[in-house]
């Protein structure tokens, strides 16, 4: 570790969930400062935790002095979407001042401020995103995300214990994994890291085991193959039956969803029979009731007779750079699921991902079977 470098760290909820863990985090911060690093520390927990962290850091040494800043004080500018605001600017003037006088700066990771100076909260993944945004805004060497696993694995390590840890992974691959269920990093944060070219190091807050560096390359190994599996249970499916097959209908349906901040994934429109078609798409379960409130009146308007919803499905995805440009992966995935007795309800792909919607009760089996088929197990 070179002297005097600037690093932004983030500690997740479980890493500061009790007094012992907070103390441990304080010790880690002090060790880094004593090694010569300048630190900005983003925490996703509320006020009390931050206070405890500072009190402890101060107890353990008179140097470093620590200061806690709200998102607004830290210069996290957001739009006006309360509860799910997005960061659009970072003006870390105050942070720089505090760093310049030798302080460790602790920042509340879930907050920002609008141009009108109203306080906002960032919603899911807010702290991951704040850490990466601050690292970009401050020109920090990297963002370090400390969590309850040792890094990024080729499958959720809590779901499949024999999953393997990566020393490094590309933004591109991490973005697909995060977007398709690997909640270890929020996709917003990965995207921001890619755009701003901020390397992101993910590691354990409990141990010193080497973590995973998310970066833009070059990579030691050309990975022209399936490199990881993700699963996502947060899926709800909506089917609109008997949609008239005429121009503009899809826009009429999906525009209001977008305007209400509901992201739609996996859209399938069947071939029409007698100028009527079925339209199927997925949203997250937490958005289902709002999505239905929007879709039902539109369905009435366009005289589609039926809107169906269900929440028993889950997504399982295989991800790897260069995967779909090489032949055979899709076939092998479908055969593997078939041989495990798993029915595929929907399929979507990107250049580096293939996703199948399956019964949520079969997800564990599916992930294990795919791990075997694509030789992703440890050892
Ligand atoms: P934090 O509170 O620190 O933000 P999260 O619960 O958001 O932690 O993210 C960590 C969790 O992400 C892990 O406990 C793990 O179960 C899950 N996870 C899912 N997929 C992966 C993966 N591919 N690699 C590592 N962790 C993963
Ligand atoms: Mg998290």
Image (cartoon, rainbow, N blue to C red):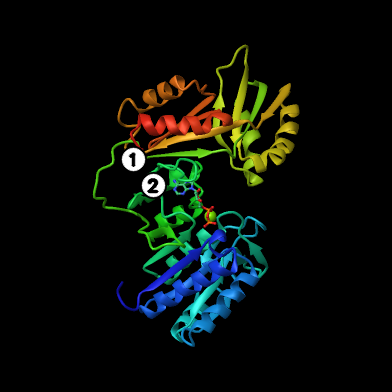
- x and y percentages locating residue 320 in the rendered image: 36, 39
Nearer the N terminus, badge 2 or badge 1?
Answer: 2
Residue 55 seen in render: yes
How packed mark 2 is, by other alpha carbons closer than 10 Å (few <14, some 14-19, many 20 or more), is: some
Q: Which residue appears farthest toward the top when viewing the image?
A: 274
Query: Relative to 277, does residue 256 appear above or below in the rendering?
Result: below
How many numbered markers are drawn?
Answer: 2
Mark 2, secondary structure of its residue = helix
Q: Residue at x 36, y 38 (%)?
A: 377
Q: Residue at x 46, y 67 (%)?
A: 9
Q: Nearer the viewer, residue 251 or 222?
A: 222
Residue 246 seen in render: no
- x and y percentages locating residue 110 in the rendered image: 60, 63
Image disc number at residue 172: 2
Mark 1, secondary structure of its residue = loop
Q: Which residue is mark 1?
A: 321
Q: Residue at x 34, y 41 (%)?
A: 378
Query: Relative to 357, does residue 233 appear above or below in the rendering?
Result: below
Q: Nearer the viewer, residue 63 or 141?
A: 63
Mark 2 vs mark 1, CA separation in Å: 8 Å
Whether pointer 2 and pointer 1 mark residues with C-beta atoms closer than 8 Å, the reply is yes
User: Split into 4 quadrants, where in the image is the N terminus?
Assistant: bottom left
Q: Residue at x 50, y 23 (%)?
A: 342
| Disc 1 C-beta below 8 A from ligand 1 | no
């Amino acid at each position: 570790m070179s002297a005097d470098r600037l690093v932004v760290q983030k500690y997740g909820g479980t890493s500061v969930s009790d007094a012992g863990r907070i103390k441990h985090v304080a010790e880690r911060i002090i060790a880094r400062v004593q090694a010569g690093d300048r630190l900005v520390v983003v925490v996703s927990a509320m006020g009390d935790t931050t206070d405890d962290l500072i009190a402890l850091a101060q107890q353990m040494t008179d140097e470093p002095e620590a200061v806690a800043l709200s998102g607004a004080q830290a210069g996290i500018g957001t739009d006006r979407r309360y509860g799910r605001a997005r960061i659009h600017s970072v003006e870390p003037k105050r942070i720089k001042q505090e760093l310049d006088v030798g302080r460790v700066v602790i920042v509340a990771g879930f907050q920002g401020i609008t141009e009108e100076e109203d306080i906002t909260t960032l919603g899911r993944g807010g702290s991951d995103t704040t850490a990466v945004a601050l690292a970009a805004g401050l020109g920090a060497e990297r963002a370090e995300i400390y969590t309850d696993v040792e890094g990024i694995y080729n499958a959720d390590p809590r779901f499949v214990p024999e999953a393997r840890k990566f020393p490094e992974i590309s933004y591109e691959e991490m973005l697909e994994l995060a977007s398709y269920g690997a909640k270890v990093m929020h996709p917003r944060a990965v995207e921001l890291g890619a755009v701003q070219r901020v390397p992101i190091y993910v590691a354990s807050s409990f141990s010193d085991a080497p973590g995973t560096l998310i970066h833009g390359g070059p990579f030691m190994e050309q990975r022209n193959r399936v490199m990881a599996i993700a699963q996502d249970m947060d899926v709800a499916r909506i089917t609109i039956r008997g949609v008239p097959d005429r121009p503009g209908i899809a826009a009429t349906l999906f525009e209001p969803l977008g305007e209400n901040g509901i992201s739609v994934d996996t859209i399938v429109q069947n071939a029409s029979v007698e100028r009527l078609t079925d339209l199927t798409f997925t949203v997250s379960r937490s958005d289902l009731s709002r999505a239905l409130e929007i879709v039902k009146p539109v369905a009435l308007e366009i005289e589609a007779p039926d809107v169906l919803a269900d929440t028993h499905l889950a997504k399982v995805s295989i991800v790897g750079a260069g995967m779909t440009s090489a032949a055979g992966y899709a076939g092998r995935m479908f055969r593997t699921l078939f041989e495990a007795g798993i029915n595929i309800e929907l399929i979507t792909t990107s250049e580096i991902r293939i996703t199948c919607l399956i019964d949520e009760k079969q997800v564990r089996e599916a992930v294990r079977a795919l791990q075997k088929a694509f030789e992703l197990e440890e050892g």
